[in-house]
Image (cartoon, grey):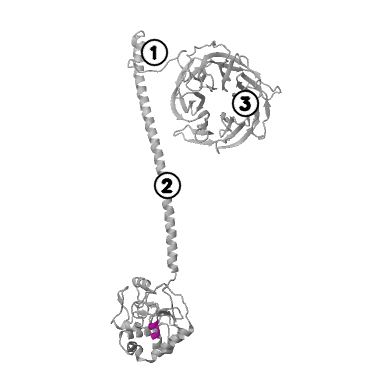
């Protein structure tokens, strides 16, 4: 390597000092020297050998505007110290080239390496001038692959005679081995650069993916912020309501103190005492309504109101604090759905869209044994069992007619019942998925709109079903061989039964009737009846009545009757409220006044009247959970929840 480096230096030094070599170059073709003859011979040999195309590193070839016959050495001779304009340093000295390439000897810095990479392949390594695509300084290469200007490499090889070698790799070569390269541009792919490009592209893609992920998180955070801001607004609204309620309670406390003072003075006949006793204070604030029958044994206050568009009926799960509501969704094509709604704020909801073949849901009950199951009856001739955990129908029975009512067996977790439109009662065992266990014929072909399973008590373990249709109440002995039910006495005294409420703990039953078309409108009742009026939606309010029964052994005893304002078209639902250590209450809707009426049993004395937000009244349920009683009432698109207050 030292020998190559020394030879290369000598040659470059000869380019700087005028000598025989430079004179020979200046003489040109007129001198007719031996070198010219050798050149001609070499060119002849080149023409005979043909042209070889050899690949090289990236090369940009510029057309030479000067005379192509001017040799590289002649151009070099015009300057004392040729410079590379890109590097800005002198070339042609002893340190201009090295055997391994081009640079400032063995002490190359990072900057020089970078500059060398920029010009590598653009200039002849001997004269540091750009080669051309034609003429004496045409781009050519040696067998080893290194590229030079034609005139420079020929003179290099001629100067060394038979021992000619490549200035860069020291491989032997001769003049005849030099090959011209005929190309305007040579391009090679830098593998390292390609790797860097691929790496940077992958990194850019990764960063773009991260940016997209952060953008999605930002959108989610904004949604959460909006949600929590809404919750904060709701909390502020409720706080305002509580403050208003607190102010009213303080005012009532003041009134009570004044009333207590009046009682202590013994001035019961004074105008002030009379006003206070009637529920008014001298400041003009209402104490609250009082009703016939003495002091109320219970009091329900409004807890919350929820909007439930298209709701028809519902049931409550006490353990999970959840409502399940049967609805008809409006929009493009009316669809039936079941909606799960939490009783815990913020009352999250989840819709379960039902198949179109199921049609409208007529009855719905959550299992008393497994709160994750619900059974519902529909007009699509189907009885279905729904999983409230997976929101899927896990069992569906095909029925011979539309189902109007359903019920769980209170004594057996596997048995369910369905009351049909044609008056039949079907008994199912969920362990048998193909068909019902029993099909029982009714006393008429009228639809069974209400059905309840009775607890085993005096019936000695026999399964008994209580149902209601327009003809009255029927008792079904499921395990007996009779087949047909028996009609409860005094339950079919001329009216049309439209509703039935049942309390399992006490065996109290209240049936609601409206008059038949031909029957007299005069009904003997134990309480006066409010004046009937036109119902805003769903027909008119007409005079009807409620009848209280209680089971005694295998029969039912009639305990009392009261008048009621009922719908002449719809079949509203009612409920019995079983308060702990208090009298049971009967809850029903009044069609004339649009109120939920609470009446004590068995006297039917009015305990409380709760104003409903919407009309018409549809369904009511009572639930005792977490040491509190909740009375839920469903009217048009509105679900009101009332909480039992301390006595």
Q: Where is residue 509 shown, x and y percent of the image?
A: 57, 19
In screen coordinates, is 127 left or right of 315? left
Q: Quadrant of residue 286?
A: top left
For disc 2, the neighbor class at 10 Å (few under 14, some 14 to 19, many from 20) is few
Rendered residue at 56%/30% (across/down)? 360
The one nearer the camera, 25 or 647, is 25
Q: Earlier in the sequence, mark 2 or mark 1?
A: 2
Segment tinted magenta in the rendering: 150-156
For disc 3, the neighbor class at 10 Å (few under 14, some 14 to 19, many from 20) is many
Tell me the element at label 1. loop
Q: Earlier in the sequence, mark 1 or mark 3?
A: 1
The one nearer the camera, 641 or 611, is 611
Callouts 3 and 2 close, C-beta under 8 Å: no
Pointer 1 residue: 278
Quadrant holding the N terminus: bottom left
Q: CA distance from mark 2 to mark 1?
A: 61 Å
Name, please, the residue furthest toward the top: 269
């Amino acid at each position: 390597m030292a020998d190559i480096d020394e030879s290369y230096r000598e040659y470059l030094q000869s380019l700087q000092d005028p000598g025989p070599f430079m004179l020979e170059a200046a003489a040109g073709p007129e001198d007719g020297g031996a070198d010219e003859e050798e050149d001609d011979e070499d060119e002849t040999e080149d023409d005979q050998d043909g042209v070889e195309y050899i690949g090289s590193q990236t090369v940009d070839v510029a057309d030479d505007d000067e005379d192509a016959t001017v040799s590289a050495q002649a151009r070099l001779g015009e300057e004392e110290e040729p410079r590379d304009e890109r590097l800005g340093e002198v070339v042609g000295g002893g340190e201009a080239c090295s055997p391994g390439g081009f640079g400032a000897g063995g002490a190359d810095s990072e900057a020089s390496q970078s500059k060398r990479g920029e010009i590598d392949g653009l200039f002849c390594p001997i004269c540091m001038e750009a080669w051309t695509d034609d003429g004496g300084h045409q781009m050519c290469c040696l067998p080893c692959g290194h590229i030079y200007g034609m005139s420079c490499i020929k003179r290099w090889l001629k100067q060394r005679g038979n021992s000619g070698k490549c200035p860069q790799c020291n491989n032997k070569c001769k003049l005849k081995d030099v090959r011209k390269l005929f190309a305007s541009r040579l391009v090679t792919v830098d593998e390292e650069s390609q790797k860097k490009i691929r790496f940077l592209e992958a990194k850019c893609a990764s960063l773009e993916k991260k940016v997209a992920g952060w953008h999605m998180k930002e959108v989610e955070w904004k949604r959460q912020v909006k949600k929590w801001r809404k919750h904060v607004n709701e909390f502020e609204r409720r706080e305002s309501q509580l403050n208003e309620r607190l102010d009213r309670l303080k005012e009532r406390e003041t009134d009570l103190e004044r009333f207590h003072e009046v009682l202590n003075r013994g001035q019961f006949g004074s105008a002030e005492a009379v006003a206070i006793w009637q529920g008014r204070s001298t400041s003009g604030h209402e104490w609250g309504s009082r009703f016939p029958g003495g002091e109320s044994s219970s009091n329900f206050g409004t807890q919350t109101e929820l909007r439930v568009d298209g709701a028809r009926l519902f049931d409550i799960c006490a353990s999970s604090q959840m409502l399940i509501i049967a609805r008809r969704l409006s929009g493009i094509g009316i669809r039936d759905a079941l909606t799960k709604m939490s009783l815990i704020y913020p009352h999250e909801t989840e819709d379960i869209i039902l198949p179109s073949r199921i049609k409208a849901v007529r009855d719905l009950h959550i299992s008393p044994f497994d709160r994750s199951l619900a059974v519902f009856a529909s007009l699509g001739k189907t009885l279905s069992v729904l999983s409230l955990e997976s929101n899927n129908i896990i069992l569906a029975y095909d029925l011979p007619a539309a189902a109007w009512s359903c019920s769980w067996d209170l004594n057996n977790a596997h048995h369910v019942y369905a009351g049909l439109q044609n008056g039949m009662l079907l008994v199912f065992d969920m362990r048998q998925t193909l068909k019902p266990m029993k099909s029982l014929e009714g006393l008429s072909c009228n639809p069974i709109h209400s059905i309840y399973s009775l607890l085993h008590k005096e019936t000695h373990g026999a399964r008994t079903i209580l149902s209601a249709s327009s003809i009255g109440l029927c008792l079904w002995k499921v395990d007996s061989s009779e087949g047909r039910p028996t009609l409860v006495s005094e339950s079919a005294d001329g009216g049309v039964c439209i509703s039935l409420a049942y309390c399992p703990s006490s065996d109290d039953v209240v049936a609601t009737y409206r008059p038949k078309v031909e029957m007299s409108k005069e009904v003997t009742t134990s309480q006066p009846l409010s004046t009937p009026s036109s119902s805003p939606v769903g027909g008119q309010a007409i005079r009807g009545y409620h009848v209280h029964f209680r089971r005694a052994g295998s029969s039912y005893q009639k305990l009392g009757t009261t008048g009621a304002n009922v719908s002449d078209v719809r079949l509203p639902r009612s409920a019995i409220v079983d308060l702990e250590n208090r009298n049971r209450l009967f809850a029903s809707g009044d069609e004339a006044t649009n109120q939920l009426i609470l009446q004590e049993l068995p006297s039917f004395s009015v305990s409380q009247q709760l104003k409903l937000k919407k009309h018409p009244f549809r369904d009511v349920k009572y639930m005792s959970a977490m040491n509190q009683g909740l009375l839920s009432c469903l009217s048009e698109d509105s679900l009101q929840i009332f909480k039992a207050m301390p006595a």
